[in-house]
Every structure is written in structure tokens, then in C-alpha cells.
Amino acid sequence: MCRETKVTESELEILKVVWRLNKATTSEIVSELIKKTSWSPRTIQTLISRLSNKGVLGIEKLNRKTYIYYSLVTEEEYKNFANESLLNKLYNGSLNLMMTTFIKNTKLTETDINYLKNLLDER
């Protein structure tokens, strides 16, 4: 994912639907998001167009009126980009500072603590 490409929270909701469905038509995306947002179909179509213009969604023309959208960025690629962006933006690239903040300010269960210890031991 290009560093200059910014995906808004609303656009991310579109991506989540496309990732879940793998490929989706406008009507499939609209029907998914109408259930959980107050967005109009026109708003959803605008968000789809923005993602397409940003090079995040690809378009396949099925017929004159139907387009199929697919993500040009995997969910894992996006998460890695977002994690790196957060790390740099809020913690000046310091993983230690970020992890310390999360660990000190989050209620961790014994299971969480053991998982993190094991993960660090493996590394």
C-alpha cells in the first residue's frame, strides 16, 4: 500500500466488506452496510468510488450496469501499514514505548500475559 494513500474510517468499512466477500458488487456492499450504518446507498457508492480512485479497489465490469469490486490490498497488508503508521505517528517509531503504553493501560488477563510471554520467548 502506498504510503501516501490514506483510507478513512468510512472507507475502511467498505474494505472490510470486500475482504469478507472477496469480490462484491455495489448492491452487495450496500446491502451489507445498510444493516449496520445510517449511510445512504449514494454515500456508499461515493466511498467505493473514492477507494477505486485511490487505487485500493479494483473494478471488473460484469455487464453494462454491474461492476464487481475487489481489493488491491490484502487485509494483512493494510493492517501492517496501519500498525506502522500508528507506531510512527504516536510513538516516534518506538515499539518499546507503544507496547509499554498498551501493557500499562490495558487490563490483561492471565491468559493474555502468558500468551505475550510465550510470544516473546519464541522470538
Image (spheres, rainbow, N blue to C red):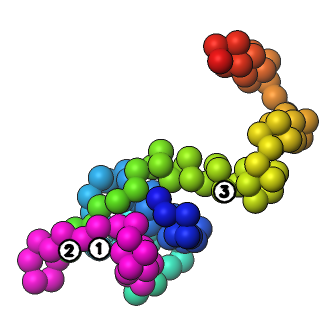
Residue 19 visible here? yes
For the residue pair 109 and 60, the one nearer the viewer reads as 60
Q: Of helix, strand and loop, which one carries label 3?
A: helix
Asked if the residues shown at circle 1 and circle 3 are in contact, with their CB atoms under 8 angstroms apart, the answer is no
Query: Disc 1 marks which residue?
Result: 26
Q: Name the kind of residue labelled 3 in the image.
A: Ser
Name the disc covering residue 1, or none.
none
Q: Name the kind of residue labelled 2 in the image.
A: Tyr
Residue 102 at x, y percent in the picture? 82, 40
For the residue pair 115 and 88, the one nearer the viewer reads as 88
The image quadrant of residue 16 is: bottom left
Dot 1 alpha-carbon crowd within 10 angstroms: few under 14, some 14 to 19, many 20 or more:
some
Query: Disc 3 marks which residue?
Result: 85
Q: Which residues are magenta?
A: 45-66
Dot 3 alpha-carbon crowd within 10 angstroms: few under 14, some 14 to 19, many 20 or more:
some
For the residue pair 28 and 102, the one nearer the viewer reads as 102
Of mark 1 and mark 3, the one earlier in the sequence is 1
